[in-house]
Amino acid sequence: MIRRISIALLCLVASALVATSQEYNARHDSVWVYNSWDAILDQWPDTLVVNPEISVWTPYDIEFETRSKSTNEMFKHQTVAVAVGDTTWLINSQWLLDQGYKGDIKKMEDYVPLFFNAKVAFIQCVPTRTSSGMALLGALLGDPELFSEDPWENPADFFWIDFENKRVDKIDHKKLSELLSVYPDLQRRFEQMRDYKKRYIIQSFFIDFIKRTERDPSYPYIFDRLYPPQALQ
């Protein structure tokens, strides 16, 4: 059974660990590896990697490494997502790039927190890459950090995985309004909010959107968006 998305979104690292700006290295007894979306949706892992080294560069940039070159290559390009423990899922940003996904995925590195159910999938992240234009502007103003977010300090945003168009896009007020268009009452309530551009309002309505899709028999499943009927003929 596909697990339900937790509203209290959990990160891989405990708060005591993410409070420091230093890299955190750990070993974990088991990392379940999924090399396809079919495997993820079926909850049927392709393999189990025992005792890999986990480098947590930030809570949203996590790398896996072993002594095996072939396993490292699998982690880098073949693996779609991994499960650490029972509840923590991480998606491979490089795999999405290799598959031709566009948008904000270009700002992410290594593995980032993934949340999904049978109908929706999204990423939680503070992007670690800053666009060259914004970085240059910050440098010209004498503060290279001015236009880059601190992944250790700043709250994370949600990023929608669009399977049909192969995109990963930040869920800002415009993107959320687009998603809510299938539920006009919810879209209207959101757009009438005074602070509808604020992160906390956006995330609250996004969770409402997820709950609505779960109850809606007409909302398409991820599998149907990955493999539309016409493509299977």
Image (cartoon, helix red, strand yellow):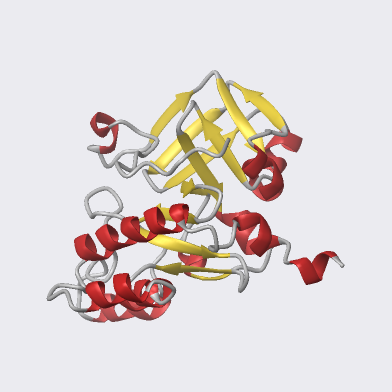
The reply to whether residue 61 is in sight is yes
Q: Quadrant of residue 229?
A: bottom right
Q: Please name the residue shown 30% across and 31% down the image.
A: 14
Q: Which residue occupies the foreground of this view, 131 or 181?
A: 181
Question: Residue 176: horizontal and vertical position, in percent?
Answer: 36, 71
Question: Residue 134: horizontal and vertical position, in percent?
Answer: 33, 78
Q: Which residue occupies the foreground of this view, 233 or 184?
A: 184
Question: Residue 204: horizontal and vertical position, in percent?
Answer: 25, 58
Q: Quadrant of residue 193?
A: bottom left
Tell me the quarter of the image containing the N terminus.
top right
Q: Quadrant of residue 198?
A: bottom left
Q: Which residue occupies the foreground of this view, 209 or 72?
A: 209
In the rendered view, does 30 fall on the left or right side of 132? right
Tell me the quarter of the image containing the C terminus.
bottom right
Furthest toward the top, the residue is 29
Q: Please name the residue shown 38% across and 53% down the image.
A: 211
In the rendered view, does 76 fall on the left or right side of 189? right
Furthest toward the left, the residue is 194
Up/down of 14 relative to 63, above or below = above
Counting every numbered tag in the picture gives 0
Question: Residue 45: horizontal and vertical position, in percent?
Answer: 68, 33
Q: Which residue occupies the foreground of this view, 67 or 207?
A: 207
The reply to whether residue 36 is in sight is no
Q: Please name the residue shown 39% across and 58% down the image.
A: 212
Up/down of 122 relative to 24, above or below = below
Furthest toward the right, the residue is 233
Up/down of 133 relative to 26, above or below = below
Q: Please name the residue shown 27% across and 56% down the image.
A: 150
